[in-house]
Image (cartoon, rainbow, N blue to C red):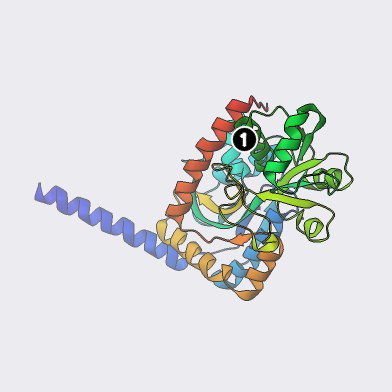
Amino acid sequence: MNRIQMLCGAVAALCIAGAAGAAQDYPTRPVRMIVPFAAGGPTDVIARVVAQKLTEGLGQQVVVDNRAGAGGNLGMGLAAAAPADGHTLIVVSSSFVVNPGLYSSIPYDPYKSFIPVSNMAASPNVFTVHPGIAARNMKELLTVVAADPKKFSVATPGVGTTPDLSAQLLKLTTKLDFVTVPFGGAGPAVASVVSNQTPIGCTALPPTTQHIIGGRLRGIAVTGAKRSSAIADVPTMAEVGFKGQEADTLQGLLVPAGTPKPIVDRLHGLVVKMMVLPDVKSRVEGLGFDIIASSPAEFTTQVKVEVEKWAKVVKAAGIKVN
């Protein structure tokens, strides 16, 4: 038995040494950072900021590879099938935790296909109204809607996005039968509310911030756990009496499952350092995001909680995407 224990110990030591050696040599070539969305969106912008800083920290070029399609599933599937050696990274948005409950089949397992490195930043969703609507807070808005629910519709960026699900969650909570109108992105949804074609909107914060500040939209409530510094006078849903409505748009860094822990730890350490740099912090917050820089353990827990939460909302709302 002692010989077996000694042999197991020696094998374990060799494995640990091998992993440590791999991390010490890492990276040995350029690193691919998959972004499962088109260029120009907030996830792409943040990914490019992070890629630049990782290039400096790793001493190898980190190249952004946009692989848009199927609500993010295409890029996430490519990353899940990539070698687990740290040379493929992926930056995901909240579709990563929503899609498992939204699609009948996806090319990744949110728990088994990846190792979460960090939720780098997040932005709450925000409910807005056209200034012509006679409501200045959520309770007033719901009173107006309750008087004639069919008259009011809520613009969202698309079926299954976290803003769309936030509107669905509010609908389920309040039992109000208002109509949700999913657009093909945040831009068209915001434009519809600004022009008063759709009286109410629910989108991620970044596309609406300047419209709220400029008075073209009125911020009613944000879905974050705390107020956003970008629109500090707009309360959270919990503050106005609607608890359990928390939702945001995450910006997470993942690596394929099986990536050695020393590499994961190194990447996480670089992320924590870069996210507090003045130029990175200014750029990210300028987009309407708050710096999070969570640990792998914290992000792993968040993924589990959010996958389960949004799957329940999708099922209750009867949303289906083939």
Q: Kindly give the residue lying farthest to the bottom in the view shown.
A: 278
Q: Residue furthest left?
A: 1
> Label 1 is placed on what type of residue?
Leu
* Image coordinates for residue 148, horizontal then vertical, percent: 78, 29
- Can I make out residue 69 in this image? no
Q: Residue at x 46, y 58 (%)?
A: 295
Q: Quadrant of residue 157?
A: top right
The C terminus: image quadrant: top right
Q: Secondary structure at mark 1?
A: helix
Residue 10 coordinates in the image, percent (x, y): 22, 56
306 on left or right of 75: left
Which residue does the image show at 26% across and 53% down from the upper left?
11
Neighbours of disc 1 within 10 Å: few (<14), some (14-19), many (20+): many
Would residue 16 be seen by someone viewing this image from the given angle? yes
Vertical order, 217 against 23 (above or below): above
Position of 108 with respect to 289 (left or right) is: left
Say which of 62 and 205 sits in front: 205
The residue pinned by badge 1 equals 169
Say which quarter of the image contains residue 64.
Answer: bottom right
> Where residue 62 sits in the image (x, y, percent)?
62, 63
Residue 113 x, y percent position in the rendering: 50, 42
Q: Is residue 317 above or below residue 190?
A: above
